[in-house]
Image: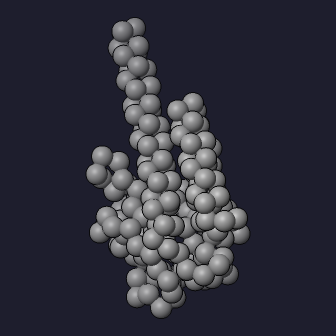
Amino acid sequence: MAKGQDEVAALKRIIEITGALNSTLNVDELLELIMSSAAELLGAETSSLLLLDEESGDLVIHIATGEPGERVERRHVPSGKGIAGAVLESGEPTVVADAKNDPRFYGVMDDATGFETRNMIALPLKVRDQAIGVVEVINKRDGDFSEEDKALAGALANQAAIAIDNARLYAKLADAVVTSRMSYRL
């Protein structure tokens, strides 16, 4: 596809995700759509969404697409470890051209799955300026990730953050309704 067609395809996909965001409460399905779209639109082998576990401080892989997918879901990245940990702490997105030689790289996931991380984009997942996780898009098939790729990944990460925030707000509201009904019956 030509560059203009790529941009139109990306915009169409973001519009599709926004429509889904406004019409579903199935947040896992929506996050799966966002992450698979990130990998597809950026020409990457895989993508993952890691959420902060408030109790342990670890990042937990919540969604992972592509070849390593299910083998890494629910695995923990210890607090402050890896490129994801650095991005969570700094709050700044980063493009890594040579992951294996980056001193921040946490190779435990690659070792456990036999997958090889070559390059990546890692972006903080923010809700109301609070970092709640990290989105990673891994192994561009043709070359290295660009600034345009980083911008597109950022738009998709924003969609994921909105979906997570909506789900959390809905859960709080549902809990409040249940609590209110229980106290009313007493």
Q: Quadrant of the C terminus?
A: top left
Determine which quarter of the picture holds residue 178: top left
Rendering coords of residue 51 (x, y %): 45, 57
- In the displayed structure, would residue 114 be above or below residue 179? below
**In the depicted view, which residue is nearer to us: 139 or 5?**
5
In the shown orientation, is residue 9 left or right of residue 18? right
The residue that appears at 33% across and 67% down in the rendered structure is: 92
- In the displayed structure, would residue 82 be above or below residue 19? below
The residue that appears at 44% across and 25% down in the rendered structure is: 174
Rendering coords of residue 167 (x, y %): 47, 37
**In the depicted view, which residue is nearer to us: 143 or 124?**
143
The residue that appears at 39% across and 61% down in the rendered structure is: 124
Name of the residue lying farthest toward the top: 185
Rendering coords of residue 64 (x, y %): 61, 61
Note whether residue 58 is visible: no
- In the displayed structure, would residue 120 be above or below residue 25? below
The residue that appears at 61% across and 47% down in the rendered structure is: 12
Note whether residue 67 is visible: yes
In the shown orientation, is residue 128 left or right of residue 169? left
Determine which quarter of the picture holds residue 80: bottom left
Colour approach in the figure: one colour
Rendering coords of residue 148 (x, y %): 48, 67
In the shown orientation, is residue 15 left or right of residue 131? right
In the shown orientation, is residue 176 left or right of residue 7? left
- Total marks in image: 0
- In the displayed structure, would residue 122 be above or below residue 115? above
**In the depicted view, which residue is nearer to us: 107 or 9?**
9
Q: Quadrant of the N terminus?
A: bottom right
